[in-house]
Image: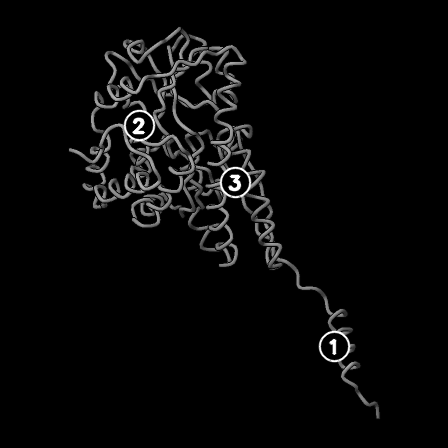
Amino acid sequence: MKRWTKKGLIGAAFATAMALPAMAETTINAVVIDGYPDRALWVKEFTNFFIPEVDKRLAEAGEYKMNWQENYGGSIVKPKGVLEGVQLGLGDIGIVTTIFHSSKLPSQGISGSTPFVASDARAVAQAVDEIAREFPAMNNEFAAQNQVYLATGVVLDTYQVFCTDEVSSVADLEGKKIAGAGLNLRYLEGIKDAAGVRGGLTDFYNMLQTGLVDCGMLWPEAAKTFKIAEVAPYMLKADLGAVNSKTITVNADYWAGLPDPVKDVLQEVAIAYRDHVAGIAMDRAEASRDAYVTDGGTIVDVSAEDRAAWANAMPNVAQEWAANLNDRGEAGTDMLSAYLGKLQSAGFTPVRDWTAK
C-alpha cells in the first residue's frame, strides 16, 4: 500500500491540474461604428485606448475576450447616421455625435446651451457625465433609441471662429455666413445679420474653400487635423466653451446578451476613455494653436468686453433648453443648476448667468 506524504499529495494535485485542459475564453464579437474617419481624435483613441484597455482588463480575468470589428469613415454609416445605426443593430457599439440629434437627445445639449462658461474639456466632460448619472434624462433618451448609455465625452477644448478673411473683433462677424453644427448655431443670434449654415466637421474645409460660408465654428485640434488654415487663415479666439458632443452607446439588444463581467468592463473603460480623450484635447490645444500659426494662420484675441457683449446679446438658450426638458417631464431646471454648480465648484465663472430668467 502506497503511503502519501503531504508533499506527495501536493505534487499529485499539481500534476492532475496540469493534465486538465485550460478553461477556454469565450469570444464575443463587437462591431464598432462611427462615420468620422480614423484620424479624428476620438476615433483614433477608441482604437488606441478604449479597445486595448478593455482587452487588458478582460484578459486579467481570463473568462472573455473581444473580437473587435471597427468600421469608420462612412464604411457603414455617415457621421450623422451613428445613432440610427446602433439603434438598428448595424453596429453593436457606436460613437454618437449628439449635436446632430437635438430633437431626439435634447438633454445632451447641456453644455452647448451654456456657452462662455468653461474652456476645459476635462471639467465639462466630468460635469456632463455626472449629470447623466444623477438625473435619468440622458439614459431615458438613449433607451428610446434602443441604446444603453455608457459615457459622454468632450473632444474639444473650446469652440473658436475660423474665417477666410481678416477679422479683428466680433463686430467683423456681422453679416457673415458661418458654419456650425447643432446648438452652436444659436450663438450667432447675438450677432447682427450673421447667418448660420449647418454642416459637419468633415464638410467645413470645402464649405470654406468654395465660399459657401465665410467662417466656421470649430476647435483648434480639429482645425489642425483638417488643415483649416489653408482655407480659413484667421481665427477669432472667442473661447465659446468646451462642449460635450460624443457619447459611447451600445445597442440595447446586444447589451442584454453580454455577460455581466463584460458589461462592467465596458462601463469602467468608457469613463476612463472619457477622461483620456478630454485630457488629450487639453494637451493638444496649445500645440494645435501653434500649428495653426505655423501653417499660416493668424489668431486674434477677443476682449473680455466683446465676449460679454456677445453672450448678453444672445437669447438665453440655457433657459430654453431647461424649459424644453421640463415640458418633457424631465428635471431640466434642476439639471441646469446642478451642471453650472459643478463647473463653478471647479473654478469656472460664466460670463453670463444662464440660470437667470
| Residue placed most toward the observer, 332 or 115 | 115
Marks 2/3: CA–CA distance: 34 Å
Residue 116: numbered disc = 2
Q: Position of residue 30 (x, y in %)?
A: 54, 46
Marks 1/2: CA–CA distance: 67 Å
Chain-order first, disc 1 or disc 2: 1
Q: Position of residue 208 (x, y in %)?
A: 43, 12
Instruction: Give the crowd class for mark 1: few <14, some 14-19, many >=20 residues within 10 Å.
Output: few
Instruction: Give the crowd class for mark 3: few <14, some 14-19, many >=20 residues within 10 Å.
Output: many
| Residue 149 versus residue 213 in the image, above or below | below
Tell me whether the residue at label 3 lies in contact with that at label 1, contact meaning CB atoms closer than 8 angstroms.
no
Q: Split into 4 quadrants, where in the image is the C terminus?
A: top left
Q: Which residue is mark 1?
A: 13
The amino acid at mark 2 is: Phe
The amino acid at mark 1 is: Ala
Marks 3/1: CA–CA distance: 44 Å
Kind of element beneath mark 1 = helix
When asked about the image quadrant of residue 312, the answer is: top left
Residue at the location (52% across, 34% down)? 43
Is residue 347 found left or right of 324 in the rendered image?
right
Is residue 150 found left or right of 62 in the rendered image?
left
